[in-house]
Image: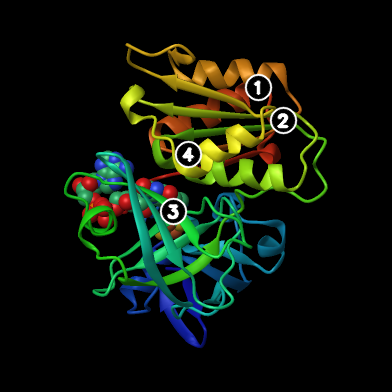
């Protein structure tokens, strides 16, 4: 049976088990949510041991270089030495200052961050409720904005999403960890096209990236595809209205699976829509966020269409296991 180390503690674990399960079984407190490599809750650092590529997928180059790794995607192996990736404590508190409900099931939230928390557009924050329940959400605002903007879909029976969309009063406080994730713009790429695809509330990080590109004076074409089941699901937050008014050059496509649809809204499969936009700009850096099943289909299709893994960034909104 392989032996791994958490700081000074030696832990025996069966071959094939994930480091996350081995640590949890040994009583180590490691935050976790999706258990599928999507949310980065379980980020730890390895000072020794074998790190397969899937255990570092989606991490930035500097994180990989530091040996940071996702414990849920890391099979135990002899000689693995793990430690916290950084401060595991809560970075501070977010205060809910405003909630707008553009549809029955989506809330656009504005939250006052603690000093020093300035997430990039497209990154993730883990919100922590009073009882310890924690869920990741993607950032639609820019680091210099006074308030952090998140878009939350109320999942039927969903604990955190119901709190955020419905029951939490203005002024409610949430613990926060983060920011995490690499769904962010790269410096110095203003001449490279962008293809941004947001499914459902996956619009939030895509809107954030489009706002960021506008603020940086992007010169190459930028396409933002907003996808939903039907037209009623295509909510339009104030920031998107403002951005499309200010930046006529932004190609904003709206795609729904189910008819009927107004003029300007396409009916069809978002995967086919994304493939046509990609074919028109095959050098684009591609960002995909939202419903996990659709994002995973998009990722596969665009990879097969020629997008390299280095140019494909995806945050599937995998539910917490
Ligand atoms: C990387 C990442 C980024 C995310 N960013 C966002 C974001 O910006 N906006 C956003 O709205 N959500 C986002 N999510 C999803 C979010 O973290 C929660 O999973 C979601 O809000 C549901 O949490 P809950 O506590 O309300 O539901 P839970 O109480 O955990 O679940 C209640 C029930 O609903 C089911 N369920 C949960 N989620 C879904 C779903 N999506 N589809 C179908 N059934 C579901 C569960 O399996 C369970 O049976 C993100 C997830 C990940 C991994
Ligand atoms: S990435 Fe490991 S629990 Fe989500």
Question: Which of these two is toward me, 46 or 136?
Answer: 136
Select label 3 or label 2 by which is in front.
3
* Image position of 183 (left or right of 175): right
In the displayed structure, 305 sits above or below 320; it is above
Relative image position of residue 183 (x, y in whole percent): 60, 48
Residue 98, quarter of the rendered image: bottom left
Mark 2 or mark 1, earlier in chain: 1
From mark 3 to mark 1, how far is it between C-alphas?
A: 27 Å
Q: Look at mark 2 in the image and give the residue it sits on.
A: 284
Q: Is residue 272 visible?
A: yes
Label 4 sits on a secondary structure element that is helix
Answer whether labels 2 and 1 touch (C-beta < 8 Å).
Answer: yes
Task: Choose mark 3 or mark 1, whichever is in front.
Answer: 3
Q: Position of residue 265 (x, y in %)?
A: 45, 16
Mark closer to the chain start, 4 or 1: 4
Is residue 235 left or right of 132 when viewed as pictured?
right
How many angstroms separate mark 2 from mark 4 (CA)?
Answer: 18 Å
Specify few, some or many for label 1: CA neighbours under 10 Å numbering under 14, 14-19, or 20 or more.
many
Q: Is any atom of residue 39 visible in this view?
A: no
Gap between marks 2 and 1, in whole Å?
A: 7 Å
* Among numbered discs 3 and 2, the one appearing first in the sequence: 3
How far is disc 4 from disc 1 in space, using C-alphas? Answer: 18 Å
Instruction: Give the residue pinned by disc 4.
Output: 203
Image: 231 above or below 12: above
Of 15 and 109, which appears nearest the observer?
109
Q: Which residue is mark 3?
A: 150
């Amino acid at each position: 049976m392989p032996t791994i180390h958490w700081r000074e503690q030696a832990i025996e674990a069966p071959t094939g088990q994930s480091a996350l399960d081995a640590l949890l079984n040994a009583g180590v407190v490691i935050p976790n949510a999706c258990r599928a490599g999507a949310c980065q809750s379980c980020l730890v650092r390895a000072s020794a041991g074998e790190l397969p590529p899937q255990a570092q997928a989606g991490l930035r180059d500097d994180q990989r270089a530091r040996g940071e790794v996702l414990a849920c995607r890391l099979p135990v192996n002899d000689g693995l030495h793990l430690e916290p990736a950084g401060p595991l404590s809560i970075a501070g508190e977010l205060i809910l200052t405003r909630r707008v409900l553009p549809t029955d099931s989506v809330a656009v939230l504005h939250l006052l961050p603690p000093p020093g928390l300035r997430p990039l557009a497209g990154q993730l924050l883990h919100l922590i409720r009073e009882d310890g329940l924690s869920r990741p959400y993607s950032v639609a605002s820019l680091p210099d904005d006074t308030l952090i903007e998140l878009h939350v879909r109320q999942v039927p029976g969903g604990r955190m999403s119901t709190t955020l969309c419905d029951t939490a009063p203005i002024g409610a406080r949430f613990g926060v960890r983060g920011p995490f994730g690499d769904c962010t713009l790269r410096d110095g790429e203003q001449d490279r096209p962008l293809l941004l695809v947001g499914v459902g509330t996956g619009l939030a990080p895509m809107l954030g990236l489009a706002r960021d590109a506008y603020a940086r004076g992007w010169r190459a074409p930028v396409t933002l595809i907003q996808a939903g089941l039907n037209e009623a699901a295509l909510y339009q937050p104030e920031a998107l209205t403002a951005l499309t008014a200010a930046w006529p050059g932004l190609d904003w496509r709206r795609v729904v699976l189910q008819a009927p649809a107004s003029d300007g809204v396409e009916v069809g499969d978002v995967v086919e829509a994304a493939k046509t936009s990609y074919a028109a700009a095959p050098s684009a850096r591609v960002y995909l966020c939202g419903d996990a099943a659709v994002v995973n289909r998009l990722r596969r299709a665009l990879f097969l269409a020629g997008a390299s893994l280095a140019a494909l960034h995806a945050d599937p909104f995998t539910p917490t296991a």
